[in-house]
Image (spheres, rainbow, N blue to C red):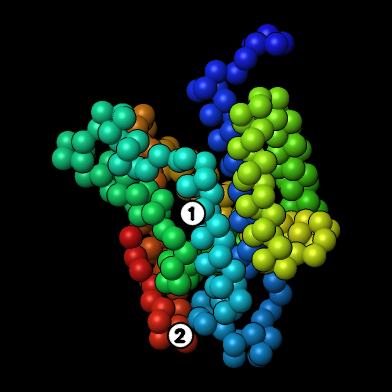
């Protein structure tokens, strides 16, 4: 696009969506369990559940609920279309889908409609915990220096994307409104300084990066075993197999739930 050209509606919306991804990604990264050392007896005693010896605290559950609620609010604010609307606009019909495609989109629909209910948040934490433990076992543990470097890359991308988006007046209004939503939420979570928030995000990346690498390796291995499956069908099937893999880890895990309101839900 040449200098001075106006951003059309579709491009502006795409640019805004990219910005929103960055804006929502970093706060959400900050609100679940961090990389940690061996749990203390007090942490074990106050946990809502123990997963292979690692506690899920009441505080991390409450923060995960808030982050999911925040994500749901951001979806509404940004006008994200529902899965049903997306499928309709794409000319797809549930009745005409293959079993793999239907399972893929039903899961996406469930996830997109989550509002931060207690057991929803708990299941996200449990699934992440077993995947993180498996990733570390497979040799994907990330150092704090590597996490800091990744954080800087994300922050740089965020600044560049935001700078570009702010060139358009309409997009600027939407972003400023969403930034206010984010600011209120950050204050609610009790982050008192940018440095504290940055450190929390770095710690969080120490958990999410190993899982991402485990997932990439899983997809690559599965793809190599099934070279005959490609395109959309590959995407549906490999994502479904990843869910099967996660559910298998959950079933093998020693999960001791201490809160009677919680239960593990399998896909």
Secondary structure beneath disc 1? helix
Name above or below for residue 54 compared with residue 159: below
Residue 257 horizontal side relative to residue 176, left or right: left
Q: Which residue appears at 55% of the width and 18% of the height?
A: 8
Q: Which callout, 2 or 1, points to the residue nearer the camera?
A: 1
Q: Which residue appears at 59% of the width and 78% of the height?
A: 57
Q: Quadrant of the N terminus?
A: top right
| Image coordinates for residue 219, horizontal then vertical, percent | 46, 43
Q: Quadrant of the C terminus?
A: bottom left
| Image coordinates for residue 244, horizontal then vertical, percent | 36, 57
Image quadrant of residue 199? Answer: bottom right
- Determine contact: label 2, label 1, CB under 8 Å: no
Image quadrant of residue 233? Answer: top left
Disc 1 designates what residue?
72
Q: Which residue appears at 50% of the width and 81% of the height?
A: 49
Residue 161 visible in rendering: no
| Image coordinates for residue 53, horizontal then vertical, percent | 56, 80
Residue 103 visible in rendering: yes
Residue 87 horizontal side relative to residue 194, left or right: left
What separation in Å lies between label 2 and label 1 (alpha carbons)?
A: 25 Å
Residue 104 horizontal side relative to residue 258, left or right: left
Is 31 in front, or is 256?
31
| Image coordinates for residue 256, horizontal then vertical, percent | 46, 83
Task: Point out the residue furthest to the left here.
Answer: 95
Disc 2 designates what residue?
259
Is 248 in front, or is 183?
183
Label annotation for residue 59? none
Is 1 in front, or is 265?
1
């Amino acid at each position: 696009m040449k200098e001075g050209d106006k951003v059309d509606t579709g491009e502006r919306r795409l640019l805004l969506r990219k910005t929103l991804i960055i804006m929502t990604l970093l706060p959400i990264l900050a609100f679940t369990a961090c990389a940690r050392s061996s749990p203390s007896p007090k942490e074990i005693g106050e946990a809502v559940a123990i997963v292979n010896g690692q506690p899920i605290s009441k505080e991390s559950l409450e923060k995960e609920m808030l982050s999911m609620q925040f994500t749901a609010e951001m979806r509404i604010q940004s006008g994200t279309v529902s899965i049903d609307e997306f499928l309709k606009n794409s000319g797809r019909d549930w009745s005409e889908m293959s079993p793999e495609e239907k399972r893929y989109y039903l899961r996406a629909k469930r996830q997109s409609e989550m509002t931060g209910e207690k057991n929803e948040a708990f299941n996200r934490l449990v699934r992440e915990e077993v995947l993180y433990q498996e990733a570390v076992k497979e040799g994907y543990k990330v150092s704090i220096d590597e996490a800091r470097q990744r954080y800087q890359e994300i922050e740089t991308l965020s600044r560049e994307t935001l700078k570009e988006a702010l060139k358009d007046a309409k997009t600027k209004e939407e972003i400023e409104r969403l930034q206010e939503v984010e600011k209120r939420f950050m204050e609610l979570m009790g982050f008192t300084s940018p440095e504290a928030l940055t450190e929390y995000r770095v710690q969080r990346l120490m958990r999410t990066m190993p899982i991402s690498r485990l997932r990439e390796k899983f997809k690559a291995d599965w793809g190599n075993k099934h070279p005959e499956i490609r395109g959309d069908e590959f995407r549906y099937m490999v994502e479904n197999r990843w869910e099967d893999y996660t559910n298998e880890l959950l079933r093998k895990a020693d999960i001791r739930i201490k809160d009677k309101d919680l239960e593990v839900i399998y896909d």
